Image (cartoon, rainbow, N blue to C red):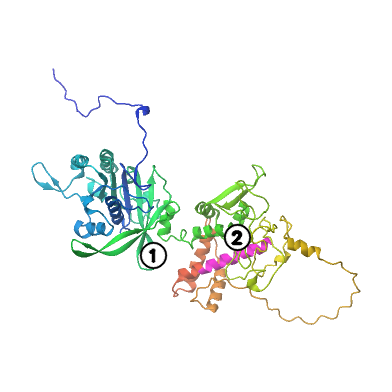
């Protein structure tokens, strides 16, 4: 009778345990929200983004018990590094010293000694078990850095299964040693339009296996001192929020190490957490036209801050004004999220009442049409005399204020479904909501608004009685009417300083003509259409001019501004 030898790794039984037997644990952190203990994390970045410097900053801070960017203190511990792309003597050690590391607590893997006594390069797949036992035996290790992660993957680094096997061994290693493991890698070329996680170079497992995936990216442009900036965001995690991030500077410094003065660099961090999703922060850092302060999202956010600065408004009114200003509904929704605009129902108007928008932590202003749930104001608080109501435009003197030498006893209400301030007890009760000077505010009705100010009531009470009307004399012949020169409304300061008035008038007229004659594509956003018209006009008419991007932005802003004013005049 023949006995069949069975594979010792073949399953004999499957062990199942009840979750009742598992002791619940909180996630422990080295850097709260960014670098978890006992977990595998991945840091990906573009060349020159400073990802190695970030890892060295982590190592330096942990080794010395330093301070994290959020102001918290690091728990001191040992750090082990396995680096294959940078020299320890000329790069790693000087940077660690520049960032205040306790070099006694930072170690590097040199090589592996075989049983035969021969030395060879460290092989993660073969040697990880031995390293695990060594670190457990020595104790006190808080962080292990592997740069780059491809150095520990044996085989095709684009093969998901090969990558997953290598990374899962590091997951078990981190749990057994009780330390954080941080692996470094690159992002794919031409991946700026992808989601943050999809930017990680290589197989999908690089982003799937780690519990935390961080992205480091350069910020477009440099500081006034010529320093390179960067941002650090969380592209993926299920143990913390992915919103927010940190901005940092790469600072060149001289450091004295081992009796030598060495030129190196260090990381300097902003103490304020960046706001927004990882995708928004990365696009802003790359100088994406939509995410930049002057871009579509930035312009929509500024629009909301201006319109809602003095109180709440009906959602429908805000949306109408946004359309008039060339802001799409999609961009407006994204800007509402970025700015933190709150949406509520009017108090006492029932569940089907119109929605009201207001800024988070908006000050309670004067009484208007009514307050919304939570006591947030509905109706703008008046501005101080001589100030513009947010949403108005620089370059126009205030109506009814000291800035243009006129005065008015009335507090005029904007016809946005809001009311003027009528309570003399509120701050700035003598203030006026202001309009561009060529808007006839005296002709505006007070439809749907409060009665008006006490001054208005007093003025009405002081009227005398009207006496009898005398006979009307004959009207003489009307003489010839000469040409009437229409006063030119004051121009906003959109014109670039280096463009002459004559050229600017020509450019504005040419842009408007091009806009009327150009057909908008199906599903094309209005703001994108206006920018496309500007680029086409300048390429065709001013091909040899420099700084055409600046000119295009100025022309579009000028067009947006006057389109917005035209919509306001039509509403009045």
Q: Horizontal and vertical percent for residue 134?
A: 19, 41
Q: Residues within 10 Å of mark 2 (few under 14, many from 20)?
A: some
Question: Can residue 540 be seen by looking at this rendering?
Answer: yes
Secondary structure predominantly adopted by residues drawn in magenta: helix
Work out which quarter of the rendered image holds the C terminus and state it: bottom right
Residue at the extreme top: 1
Taking the magenta stretch, the answer to whether it contains residue 567 is yes
Dot in front, 1 or 2:
1
Work out which quarter of the rendered image holds the N terminus and state it: top left
Q: Nearer the viewer, residue 122 or 528?
A: 122
Q: Horizontal and vertical percent for residue 473?
A: 89, 77
User: In the rendered view, would you say 480 is above or below 314?
Assistant: below
- Say left or right for 400 vs 285: right
How many angstroms separate mark 1 from mark 2 (CA)? 33 Å
- The residue beneath circle 1 is 221
- Say left or right for 449 vs 136: right
Question: Can residue 48 be seen by looking at this rendering?
Answer: no
- Say left or right for 403 vs 99: right
Residue beneath the point at 11% across and 43% down: 114
Q: Are marks 1 and 2 in contact (CB under 8 Å)?
A: no
User: In the rendered view, would you say 117 is above or below 336?
Assistant: above
- Say left or right for 205 vs 127: right
Q: Nearer the viewer, residue 404 or 208?
A: 404
Quadrant in the picture for residue 569: bottom right
Taking the magenta stretch, the answer to whether it contains residue 221 is no
Residue beneath the point at 38% across and 46% down: 236
- The residue beneath circle 2 is 324
Q: Horizontal and vertical percent for residue 221?
A: 38, 65
The mark nearer the N terminus, 1 or 2, is 1
Magenta stretch, residue numbers: 554-572
Q: Horizontal and vertical percent for residue 404?
A: 64, 73
Q: Nearer the viewer, residue 504 or 305?
A: 305
């Amino acid at each position: 009778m023949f006995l069949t030898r069975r594979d010792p790794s073949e399953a004999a039984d499957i062990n199942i345990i009840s979750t009742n037997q598992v002791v619940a644990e909180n996630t422990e952190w080295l850097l709260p929200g960014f670098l978890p203990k006992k977990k595998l994390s991945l840091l990906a970045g573009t060349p020159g983004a400073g990802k190695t410097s970030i890892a060295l900053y982590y190592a330096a801070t942990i080794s010395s018990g330093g301070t994290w960017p959020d102001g918290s203190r690091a728990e001191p511990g040992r750090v082990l590094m396995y680096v294959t792309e940078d020299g320890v003597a000329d790069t790693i050690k000087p940077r660690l010293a520049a960032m205040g590391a306790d070099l006694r607590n930072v170690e590097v893997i040199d090589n592996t000694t075989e049983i035969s006594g021969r030395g060879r390069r460290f092989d993660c797949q073969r040697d990880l078990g031995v390293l695990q036992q060594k670190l457990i035996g020595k104790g006190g290790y808080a962080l292990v850095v592997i740069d780059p992660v491809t150095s520990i993957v044996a085989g095709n680094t684009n093969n998901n299964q090969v990558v997953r096997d290598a990374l899962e061994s590091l997951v078990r290693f981190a749990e057994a040693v009780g330390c954080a493991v941080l692996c470094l890698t690159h992002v794919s070329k031409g991946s700026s339009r992808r989601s943050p996680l999809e930017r990680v170079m290589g197989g999908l497992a690089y982003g799937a296996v780690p519990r935390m995936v961080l992205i480091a990216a350069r910020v477009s442009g440099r500081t006034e001192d010529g320093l390179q900036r960067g941002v650090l965001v969380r592209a993926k995690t299920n143990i913390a929020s992915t919103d927010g991030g940190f901005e940092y500077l790469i600072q060149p410094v001289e450091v004295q190490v081992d009796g030598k003065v060495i030129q190196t660099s260090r990381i300097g961090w902003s103490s304020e957490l960046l706001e927004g999703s990882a995708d928004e922060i990365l696009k802003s850092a790359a100088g994406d036209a939509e995410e930049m302060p002057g871009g579509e999202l930035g312009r929509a956010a500024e629009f909301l801050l201006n319109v809602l600065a003095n109180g709440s408004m009906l959602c429908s009114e805000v949306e109408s004004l946004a359309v008039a200003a060339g802001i799409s509904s999609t961009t407006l929704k994204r800007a509402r999220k970025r700015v933190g605009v709150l949406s509520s129902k009017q108090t006492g108007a029932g569940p089907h009442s119109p929605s009201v928008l207001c800024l988070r932590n908006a000050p309670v202003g004067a009484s208007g049409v009514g307050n919304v749930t939570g006591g947030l104001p509905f109706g703008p608080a008046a501005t101080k005399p001589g100030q513009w109501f947010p949403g108005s435009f620089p370059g126009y003197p205030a109506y009814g204020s000291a800035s243009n030498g006129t005065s008015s006893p009335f507090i005029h209400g904007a016809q946005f479904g809001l009311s003027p301030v009528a309570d003399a007890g509120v701050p700035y009760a003598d203030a006026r909501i202001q309009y561009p000077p060529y808007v006839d505010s005296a002709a505006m009705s007070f439809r749907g608004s409060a009665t008006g100010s006490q001054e208005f009531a007093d003025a009405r009470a002081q009227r005398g009685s009207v006496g009898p009307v005398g006979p009307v004399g004959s009207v003489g012949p009307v003489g010839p009417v000469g040409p009437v020169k229409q006063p030119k409304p004051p121009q906003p300061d959109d014109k670039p300083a280096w463009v002459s008035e004559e050229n600017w008038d020509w450019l504005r007229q040419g842009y408007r003509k091009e806009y009327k004659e150009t057909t908008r594509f199906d599903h094309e956003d209005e703001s994108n259409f206006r920018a496309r018209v500007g680029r086409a006009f300048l390429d065709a008419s001013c091909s040899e001019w420099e700084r055409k991007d600046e000119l295009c932005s100025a022309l579009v802003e000028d067009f947006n501004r006057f389109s917005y004013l035209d919509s306001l005049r039509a509403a009045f």
